[in-house]
Image (cartoon, rainbow, N blue to C red):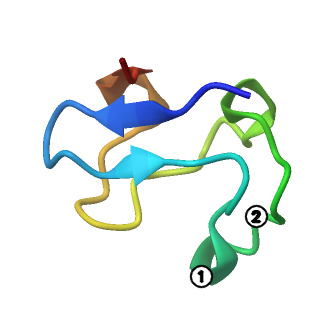
Amino acid sequence: MKKYVCEVCGYIYDPAEGDPDGNIPAGTAFENLPDDWVCPMCGAGKESFSPAD
């Protein structure tokens, strides 16, 4: 599964880790995150993320 980076703050969403603070279990692909999920570091929406190199 691909990692995604927040263009606002640089946070990297890693599907292998999920987002424990946001109740997103490990193994959740970025595409499967809820539409209202936001960056845990800066609060930016999913539209502010792009695939990490």
**Of the pair 19 and 36, the residue shown nearer to us:** 19
Residue at x 73% of width, y 24% of height: 31
At horizontal 67% and vertical 63% (from top left) the residue drawn is 17
Outermost residue to the bottom: 21
CB contact under 8 Å: marks 2 and 1 = no
Give the residue type at disc 2.
Answer: Ile
Label 1: how many Cα within 10 Å (few below 14, some 14–19, many 20+): few
Give the residue drawn at x 46%, y 31%. 4
For the point 82% across and 46% down, the residue is: 28
Distance between mark 2 and mark 1 Cα atoms? 8 Å
State the residue in front, 1 or 20.
1
Looking at the rendering, in which quadrant would you find the C terminus? top left
On screen, residue 30 versus residue 42, left or right, reads: right
Please tell me whether residue 14 is drawn above or below residue 53 in the rendered image.
below
* SS state under label 2: loop
Read off the residue under disc 2. Answer: 24
Q: Position of residue 12 (x, y in %)?
A: 38, 47
Q: Against 25, is 10 above or below?
A: above
Residue 11 in the figure: left or right of residue 24: left
The mark tally for this picture is 2
Kind of residue indicated by mark 1: Asp
Q: Quadrant of the N terminus?
A: top right
Residue 32 at x, y percent in the picture: 81, 33
Residue position for label 1 = 21
**Percent coordinates x, y for residue 41 in the rendering:** 28, 66
